[in-house]
Every structure is written in structure tokens, then in C-alpha cells.
């Protein structure tokens, strides 16, 4: 080991150098000089996760098998280089006992990236207070098919929505001095076969559908990115030079470092390093042999130096922004209130016949079903948050309406549920899924046809469990007003029973304050304003294909169309469209106008609250190509804005559309192009699109290679 510094550079001096001139060039120079001070062993250490001791300690002392404390990687004590300190957390910091926010799918339903930014600031504070400096909870995999078991961890089926929400969370982390880590790069949306599935995808689908949201997070400042387990076009993601080097670095200009998904992300250490995978997490495994590979000439010192500098760049650029966070920021009143606010803003009202909701004062209700008084906040895998309490639907409603006005039966036995509702006017049936029916793949290794409900992973089907449907049918016969509260991570096909319910809400997995949020909405204290971040089809078969355990062929084509773009193209009817949601009030859109601006287009529309109570409108802007040489989607979401209006209030909302978001990949030109004309339309409910004018851009003009 060197006894002294060769060029006077340690970590703090590298930070000072970058602070004096915060440019990309200076960042690279500072990281390079710091790397030159390091021995080969120190550089290799930067590339290796070292969480075994933390994992063992947490398991023995706390019974926690995953991320009870920050997982370390790298670091160099001699030069003051801090280790990367990893925390997971799509719905909150998983370390210790943090604030459990609603799952990202509910937050996607809020169509509110400003809210997501505030949630990101809260999560960043809790990450810092818990001892972490890297946050790997920015899950932006596209919901291609609702059977995906980890759908709850992402924001929906639309790349633009994913990009906006993921970028907001990224900015909050990076501005707080926490390295933002979007995941899982890329085309990861099948859980049970995540180690073996091969997503086959052409370049048009890759660039237009499955990668734009990752680029938005890189553009927002993310300084790390996690590779996925699956293969893309035959090559594992953590060994995929096209993804890790050609696109990520060559086309997007990514300056940070890549890290592998855990344990089984890397199969061949030298091949991964050469492809552009920098850090293996969370343990010494394949990268433990990099020293031997270097001596044998299987990797080069230049490859080691390159990866080491990327890690150093992320640390130098990000960590100095970090401020101390006191321990009492974890589960602070402000964070708990924010979790409740988010749950309210993302809950979607799907049906409300004859204005049955909100409930009248002093309404007598029965809260029944398997989740009436059961903690149900989502997956028990890597996204699990260990909050000290969770407010169930019954607890929230009892607190709001009074013990004398709320009774409960926590189960699915029809006779007991009907008996509980005997003296009530309203029934709230809490149905759907839980961690045993969908989530991270940890248990099930059998044939999906033999898979019992209760083994997790990908969903067996898209309908509610039979016992839930039987319960709804029986309750509908009581003559009481029936409100069905659907809990789960993604879309359910509900046509078979939806006509029996007076009201239907989608509350997803709504976090530790979910029961209070539900009471806020049902009582009318709050007005539901969520909009579906996915499409609810009429039939399961209308969604794209999916692979389950037991499939002989592990290849699956990830095509250009899915979600609303598929339904638009095939003209198949849907029960509830993407972007749909009801309110206790009503909104009208009028006088839409579209004009070209320096950075793209602005679509303005007048929004009026025509009802008698305040509420949130969600203005959605869609673009449609005109005169394109190639096949295009019927429409694509390209802007949105959530706006609150008092009863009778009118506001003009201007929604910007960035010119970059109007580009398509041309297989012929191997570059991006814009079509000659784009027609814009606006809607507030996913239906009733109002034409907003057209803008001419050119004639399939060449826009330069790469995103």
C-alpha cells in the first residue's frame, strides 16, 4: 500500500476541486486524480458490495433478512472515500422503522409529480437519518401486463407518466445529497421467471416504449442505475454492452455508475465489467474474482479504472449536498401527514351510482372482507417498510364515523358478513390482493397451474379471488348500499361483478395511513382525484401475452403496443380507460389552444368546476401523428397537470409539451425523427377527448442519433 499521496488528492480535496468549478469536465478530472491515488486493491474494492456482515447481524439481532441497515459497497478509508450505503424503498425507506407511503402505483394514479417530489424529499431525509447515501427505490419498469407481481412498485403503463414521476423522485434525492438509483434497467416486468426470461424487442419499441423513462431520470441527474436480472435480446442486462455502454453512456451521456441487481444479477464478472457493469451488489461474489481475472489478463486495468472513476464521480458530485437529518425526522408528523395526503390523492373512484358517495353524516356502515381490519400495505419482499403501525379501513372509518356507527367482520364468510351488515345502511367490502397473491418472487418454484394462492410472485389471473366475488354477490342481495374498495398493485378485470356495486374505489396499497385516507374520502372530507395509471380491460385475454413458470420457451416479444396504445390500435372496448377517474364534483374543459414554443408546444385549456364542492381536475394532453411515413400509436400522453378548483371556479391551465417527447425512433435512419404534423387533444377523465389544434414540425426531419 502507498504510504503517501502521489498528487495531493484525497476525497475532500476532490470535492473541493469540483465545488470550485462544478462542470462535467472538472468532475471527471477530480475523479481521475483521486483514482490515481488508489492501489489496485483499493480500486477493486470500490466495485464490490460488502453487505454480508450487515445482513448476518440484522438477521441475528432483529430477525430482518433484508436491508435492516444500509448495505455498504466500496469506500477507501485511507483517502477518506466514503462507501456507497444502499437503501431500498419504492414505498418508503426499508431500513429500521420508517414511514410507509402508498405504493408507487397509487402515487402514479395521483398524476402529481410535485407531490412525488415532496415524497422524495421526505424519503431522502429518512434515508440520511438511517445512514444511507444511495436510494434504490425509483422503480420505473413499464407495466406491460397486469399479471406482473411487482407492478405495485412502478407508476403505471405509460412511459411519459413513468418518466415524469421517476424524474421527480430522482431530483429530490440528488438535491438532498442521496445518490438516486432508477431500476431495473431494462425491460423487467415478469417476476417468477426474472432470472431466465428473455425479452425480445426491436429498436423502435426499445427507444419509444421501454427506455424513455430511464432517460428522463438520467436527465434529471441520477448518478447510478441498477441493472435487471432478465435478458434483453439474448444477453443478460448486467452483461449487456448495448444497454450499459452504447445507450446509457454513449447516447445518453450518463456520468454515474451502474450496479447489479442482487446476488444473481451477474453470471460472468469479467464479461459484466467489460460490458459496463461497475458494482456488484450486495456481496462479494463474481466480482471477488476480479483481481485474479486482472492478473490473468481477462480484464484490463483500464476497465477497472473506468468503473472506479464512475463510482468516485457519483460520490463527489452528490454527497457534499447532504445535510444531517436528525433521527426524529423518521416517522415525523409531517411525513405521516404526507403519507395520508398521498393516499387520498391517488385513490381512484371508478363508480358512484346515484351519488351514493360521500356518505351522509351519521351513516351506519359495516366494513367487511378479508382486508376490513387487516394490515395490507403491499409486498413483503425488498420493498417492505417496517412501519410501527398501519391504519386499517375499519380503524379509519370507526375513528371518523364513531364506534356506534361502524361495525366490522374481517373475513370472507358470506353468512358472517351479511349478519354484520344487518343493522347498517351501507356496506364497505374490502377485497383484492395482498403480499401472498402478488409481489416479489421468493417462494414459488412450481408450475403456475399448480400454484396455490398464497405463494406470491406473478398473479395467477386478473380477476378477484372467487371468495371475494362470492362475497360481493351475496352482499348485493341485501338491499344495502354496497361500496367495494379494491386493494392491490395493478388492474383487475371486474366486469363480472361491477354492476352489483353502487360505488367502486381503487385504493391500491395505500400505506400506513391508508385507513384514515379511505375514511377521508368516504366521509367527503376529501374529494377523490386519482386517475387510473393503467387500463382496465373487459377481458383478461385482451392484454398482451405473459409467461409463467412452466413455460418451455423463455423468449417473449415485448412489442410496440400495450396498455391504451394497444386498445386504441385494435379498437377493443375497455371497461375503464387509462387516465379515468371520477370526482364528487364535475369539470368541464373549453377553449383549448395549442401554440408552438421555443422548447416545443404549449396546450392551454380552460377548466371549470361545475359542481358544488372543491376538487382536483387532472388535465391530460395527448398527441397524435399526422402524415407519418410509419405506423404510429393513435395517441400518446405527452403532458398532464393536476389543478385544484373551488366550486364554480374557472382556471386556464397551460401544459407544456417538450419537443423531445414528440420524437420517434426510425429503424430506417437509425435515429430519431419528428413527424410532419401533430394533433393535440385534452381530456380530464381519460374519455371525451377534446381537439386542441395541430402543429406542423416538418417532414420526418432527422433529429440526430441517440435519444
Image (spheres, rainbow, N blue to C red):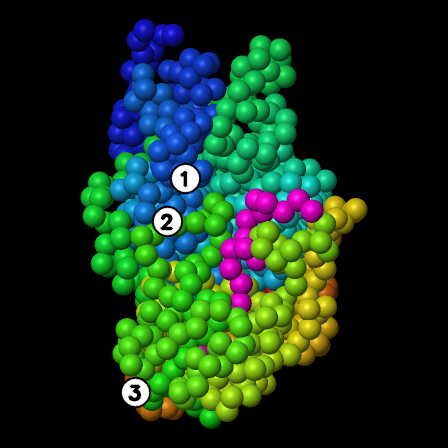
Whether residue 116 sits left or right of residue 690 in the image: it is left
Q: CA distance from mark 2 to mark 3?
A: 35 Å
Above or below, comparing residue 289 to residue 193 in the picture: above
| Marks 1 & 2, CB-CB < 8 Å contact | yes
Q: Secondary structure at mark 2?
A: loop
Which stretch is magenta?
A: 427-446
Using the rendered view, name the quadrant where residue 470 is placed. Answer: bottom right
Tell me which numbered mark, 1 or 2, is placed earlier along the sequence.
Answer: 1
Residue on which disc 2 sits: 386
The label number, if any, that marks residue 429 in the structure image: none
* Closer-to-camera residue (218/190): 190
Q: Where is the N terminus found, in terms of image quarters?
A: top left
Q: Residues within 10 Å of mark 1 (few under 14, many from 20)?
A: some
* Closer-to-camera residue (686/410): 410
Tell me which numbered mark, 3 or 1, is placed earlier along the sequence.
Answer: 1
Whether residue 668 sits left or right of residue 158 in the image: it is right
The label number, if any, that marks residue 362 in the structure image: 3
For the point 48% across and 77% down, the residue is 417
Q: What is the chief secondary structure element of the magenta stretch?
A: loop
Q: Position of residue 657 (x, y in %)?
A: 48, 66
| Marks 2 & 3, CB-CB < 8 Å contact | no
Q: Position of residue 680 (x, y in %)?
A: 55, 75
Labels 2, 3: front one: 3
Q: Is residue 534 magenta?
A: no
For the point 43% across and 73% down, the residue is 409
Residue on which disc 1 sits: 64
For the point 31% across and 52% down, the residue is 388
Q: Residues within 10 Å of mark 3 (few under 14, many from 20)?
A: few
Q: Secondary structure at mark 1?
A: loop
Q: Position of residue 661 (x, y in %)?
A: 53, 60
Q: Residues within 10 Å of mark 2 (few under 14, many from 20)?
A: many
Amino acid at each position: 500500500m502507498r504510504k503517501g499521496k502521489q498528487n495531493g488528492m484525497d476525497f475532500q480535496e476532490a470535492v473541493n476541486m469540483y465545488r470550485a468549478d462544478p462542470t462535467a469536465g472538472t468532475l471527471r478530472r477530480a475523479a481521475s486524480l483521486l483514482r490515481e491515488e488508489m492501489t489496485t486493491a483499493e480500486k477493486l474494492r470500490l466495485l464490490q458490495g460488502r453487505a454480508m456482515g450487515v445482513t448476518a447481524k440484522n438477521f441475528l439481532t432483529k430477525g430482518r433478512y433484508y436491508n435492516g441497515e444500509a448495505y455498504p459497497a466500496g469506500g477507501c478509508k485511507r483517502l477518506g472515500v466514503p462507501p456507497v450505503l444502499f437503501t431500498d424503498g419504492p414505498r418508503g425507506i426499508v431500513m429500521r422503522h420508517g414511514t410507509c407511503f402508498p405504493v408507487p402505483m397509487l402515487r402514479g394514479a395521483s398524476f402529481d409529480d410535485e407531490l412525488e417530489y415532496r415524497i422524495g424529499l421526505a424519503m431522502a431525509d429518512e434515508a440520511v437519518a438511517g445512514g444511507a447515501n444511495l436510494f434504490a427505490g425509483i422503480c420505473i419498469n413499464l407495466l406491460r401486463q397486469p399479471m406482473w407481481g411487482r407492478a405495485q412498485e412502478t407508476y403505471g403503463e405509460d412511459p411519459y407518466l413513468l418518466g415524469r414521476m421517476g424524474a421527480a423522485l430522482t431530483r429530490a434525492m440528488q438535491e438532498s445529497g442521496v445518490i438516486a438509483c432508477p431500476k431495473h434497467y431494462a425491460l423487467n416486468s415478469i417476476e417468477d421467471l426474472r432470472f431466465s426470461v428473455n425479452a425480445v424487442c426491436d429498436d423502435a419499441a426499445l427507444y419509444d416504449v421501454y427506455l424513455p423513462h430511464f432517460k428522463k431520470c438520467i436527465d434529471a441527474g441520477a448518478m447510478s442505475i441498477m441493472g435487471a436480472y432478465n435478458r434483453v435480446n439474448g444477453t443478460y442486462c448486467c452483461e449487456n454492452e448495448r444497454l450499459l455502454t452504447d445507450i446509457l453512456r454513449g447516447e445518453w451521456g450518463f456520468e454515474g455508475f451502474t450496479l447489479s441487481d442482487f446476488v444473481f444479477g451477474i453470471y460472468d464478472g469479467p464479461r459484466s465489467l467489460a460490458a459496463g457493469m461497475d458494482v456488484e451488489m450486495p456481496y462479494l461474489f463474481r466480482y471477488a474474482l476480479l483481481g485474479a481475472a486482472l492478473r490473468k489478463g481477462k480484464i484490463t486495468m483500464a476497465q477497472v479504472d473506468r468503473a472506479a472513476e464512475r463510482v468516485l464521480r457519483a460520490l463527489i458530485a452528490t454527497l457534499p449536498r447532504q445535510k444531517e437529518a436528525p433521527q426524529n425526522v423518521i416517522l415525523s408528523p409531517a411525513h405521516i401527514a404526507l403519507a395520508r395526503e398521498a393516499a387520498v390523492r391517488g385513490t381512484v373512484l371508478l363508480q358512484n351510482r346515484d351519488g351514493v358517495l360521500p356518505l351522509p353524516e351519521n351513516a351506519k356502515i359495516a366494513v367487511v372482507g378479508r382486508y376490513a381490519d387487516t394490515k395490507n400495505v403491499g409486498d413483503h419482499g425488498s420493498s417492505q417498510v417496517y412501519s410501527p403501525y398501519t391504519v386499517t379501513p375499519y380503524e379509519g372509518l370507526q375513528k371518523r364515523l364513531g364506534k356506534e356507527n361502524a361495525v366490522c367482520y374481517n373475513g370472507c364468510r358470506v353468512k358472517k358478513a351479511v349478519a354484520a351488515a344487518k343493522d347498517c345502511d351501507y356496506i364497505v367490502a374490502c377485497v383484492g390482493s395482498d403480499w401472498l397473491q402478488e409481489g416479489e418472487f421468493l417462494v414459488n418454484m412450481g408450475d403456475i397451474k399448480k400454484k396455490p394462492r398464497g405463494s406470491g410472485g406473478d398473479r395467477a389471473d386478473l380477476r378477484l379471488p372467487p371468495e371475494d366475488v362470492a362475497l360481493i354477490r351475496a352482499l348485493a342481495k341485501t338491499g344495502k348500499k354496497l361500496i367495494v374498495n379494491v386493494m392491490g398493485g395493478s388492474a383487475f378485470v371486474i366486469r363480472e361483478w361491477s354492476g352489483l356495486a353502487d360505488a367502486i374505489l381503487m385504493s391500491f396499497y395505500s400505506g400506513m395511513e391508508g385507513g384514515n385516507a379511505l375514511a377521508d374520502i368516504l366521509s367527503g372530507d376529501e374529494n377523490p382525484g386519482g386517475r387510473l395509471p393503467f387500463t382496465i380491460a373487459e377481458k383478461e385475454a385482451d392484454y398482451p401475452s405473459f409467461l409463467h413458470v412452466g413455460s418451455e420457451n423463455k423468449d417473449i416479444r415485448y412489442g410496440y403496443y400495450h396498455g391504451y396504445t394497444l386498445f386504441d390500435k385494435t379498437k377493443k372496448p375497455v371497461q375503464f380507460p387509462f387516465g379515468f377517474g371520477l370526482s364528487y364534483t364535475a369539470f368541464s374543459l373549453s377553449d383549448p389552444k395549442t401554440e408552438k414554443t421555443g422548447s416545443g408546444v404549449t396546450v392551454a385549456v380552460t377548466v371549470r368546476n361545475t359542481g358544488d364542492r372543491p376538487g382536483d381536475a387532472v388535465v391530460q394532453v395527448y398527441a397524435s401523428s399526422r402524415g407519418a411515413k410509419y405506423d404510429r400509436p393513435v395517441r400518446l400522453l405527452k403532458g398532464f397537470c393536476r389543478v385544484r378548483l373551488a366550486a364554480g371556479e374557472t382556471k386556464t391551465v397551460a401544459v407544456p409539451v417538450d419537443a423531445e417527447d414528440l420524437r420517434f425512433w426510425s429503424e430506417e435512419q437509425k435515429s430519431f425523427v419528428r413527424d410532419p404534423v401533430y394533433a393535440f387533444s385534452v381530456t380530464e377523465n381519460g374519455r371525451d377527448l377534446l381537439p386542441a389544434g395541430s402543429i406542423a414540425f416538418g417532414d420526418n426531419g432527422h433529429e440526430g442519433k441517440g435519444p
